[in-house]
Image (cartoon, helix red, strand yellow):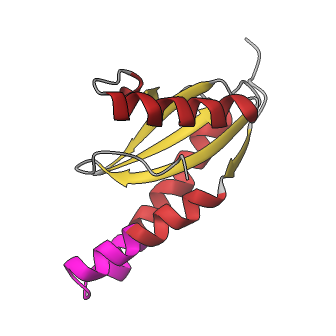
């Protein structure tokens, strides 16, 4: 059995914005526990990055790929266009506790696009 080649994992600029929004929400929710919760999320993201480098298709198929409204279809088209232009045709989600990470990948590259809480309706990856 051959060992898989490690894929390169990187983050789109929008991913940092998503992480900052999560941090702001955590602070607004409970300023005392926010630093510990953010540290745990960052540890989980590092673990996810290691796993995705080894197996880019580890996440589940992105659920928003089944749009039920015209607005959702437009957002989906924008995200798919962004993934195609980067040469990363596959869109998947990785679950980290109560957060979801949207990423695009090929066999050799993974780009983290956005992060959201599971209660949020949409990703902001299309910005």
Residue 119 percent across, percent down from the top left = 22, 50
Q: Is residue 32 above or below residue 108?
A: below
> Residue visible at 55% across and 53% down?
127
Residue 85 percent across, percent down from the top left = 74, 33
Asked if residue 107 lies left or right of residue 77, the reply is: right
Residue 27 part of the magenta segment: yes
Q: Nearer the viewer, residue 17 or 45?
A: 17
Q: Is residue 10 above or below residue 75?
A: below
| Number of numbered callouts drawn | 0
Residue 93 percent across, percent down from the top left = 45, 35
Instruction: Give the quadrant of residue 62.
Output: top left
Residue at the extreme bottom: 32
Q: Nearer the viewer, residue 107 or 62?
A: 62
Residue 100 percent across, percent down from the top left = 38, 46
Residue 23 part of the magenta segment: yes
- The quarter of the image holding the N terminus is top right
Give the residues drawn in magenta, as a range: 22-39
> Residue visible at 60% across and 38% down?
52
Instruction: Give the quadrant of residue 117.
Output: bottom left
Asked if residue 113 lies left or right of residue 18, the reply is: right
**Magenta portion: prevailing SS class:** helix
Residue at the extreme top: 1
> Residue visible at 53% across and 29% down?
77
């Amino acid at each position: 059995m051959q060992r898989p080649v490690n894929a390169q994992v990187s983050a789109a600029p929008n991913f940092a914005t998503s992480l900052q929004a999560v941090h702001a929400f955590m602070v607004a929710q409970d300023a005392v526990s926010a630093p510990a919760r953010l540290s745990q999320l960052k540890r989980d993201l590092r673990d996810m990055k290691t796993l995705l480098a080894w197996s880019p298709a580890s996440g589940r198929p992105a659920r928003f790929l089944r749009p039920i409204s015209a607005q959702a279809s437009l957002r989906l088209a924008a995200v798919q266009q962004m993934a195609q232009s980067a040469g990363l045709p596959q869109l998947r989600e990785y679950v980290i506790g109560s957060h979801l990470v949207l990423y695009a990948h090929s066999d050799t590259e993974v780009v983290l696009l956005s992060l959201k809480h599971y209660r949020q309706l949409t990703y902001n990856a299309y910005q």
